[in-house]
Image: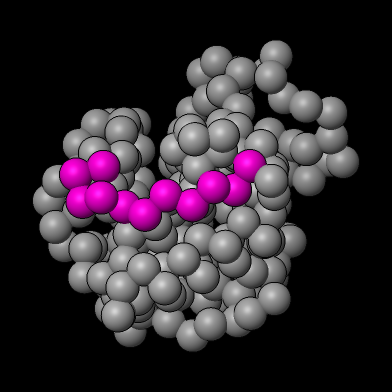
Amino acid sequence: MSDEAGVAGMLLAAGAGRRMGMPKALVQTGGGEPWVVRGTRVLLDSGCSPVVVVLGAGSQQAAQLIAVAFGNEPRLIVRNADLWAEGMSESLRAGIDALSSIELDGVIVTLVDTPSLRPETIDRVRAAADSVRSERREALVQAMFDSRPGHPVFIGRVHWADLCEDLAGDSGARAYLRAHDALSVECSDLEIGEDIDSAETVRP
């Protein structure tokens, strides 16, 4: 697995998970690993550096879980999104703000409620970012699952300022990616890429 310099990871893990009955960051896999820990680990294992984890609901408990799992991992940034309840856009804005002073080509963004995420999926999206334009900093790439848009996505550094101006509500970067013709990369052969929204859809 490659460890490319200049690409950060971002895990959006702020949601209250009302239909889940608890903050999604605190939900556990069948093996007992909290989703926030799993998502962070996959981004770190994929070579993203640094990785910023954006917390909101249940932030104190989630931050403690991260601290226990990763200790003083120097590549890890934990950031609270003060306005997280206003939607995913505020979490994404908080994550970009946390990375803005670091020299980076781009960021791989994913969600805490996609526990199927694999390092191989991140590798494929990042490889597409390397090939889509002459400079990776200009790239926009979105993972697709049976032609359904999902995560992870790659957002090149050139787009960060304009994206932050465009963000609103709970749609995150969706409208920006569509308006700027993000490259679609099919990843359904690697994982299901499903966002888990309720306890009934959590797989063992």
Q: Quadrant of residue 2?
A: bottom right
Front residue (pair 76, 41): 41
Instruction: Inspect this view and state whether residue 83 appears.
Output: no
Indicate left or right for 14 with 200 as reference. left
Q: Where 6 falls versus 165 (above or below)?
A: below
Q: Position of residue 62 (x, y in %)?
A: 60, 47
For the point 41% across and 68% down, which residue is it?
129
Residue 176 is a magenta residue? no
Foreground of the two, 141 or 174:
141
Q: Is 20 on the left or on the right of 133, as rendered?
A: right
Give me the residue at 61% from left, 18% from top. Answer: 198
Of 186 and 63, which appears nearest the observer?
A: 186
Residue drawn at 55 percent across, 15 percent down:
19
- For the C terminus, the quadrant is top right
Q: Quadrant of the N terminus?
A: bottom right
* Position of residue 63 measured from the top left corner of the image (x, y, whole percent): 58, 53
The spot of residue 66 in percent (x, y) is 65, 57
User: Residue lying furthest right in this view?
Assistant: 31
The quarter holding residue 203 reads: top right
Is any part of residue 179 visible from this angle?
yes
Which residue is located at x 43 percent, y 82 percent? 6
Report the span colored magenta. Answer: 178-188
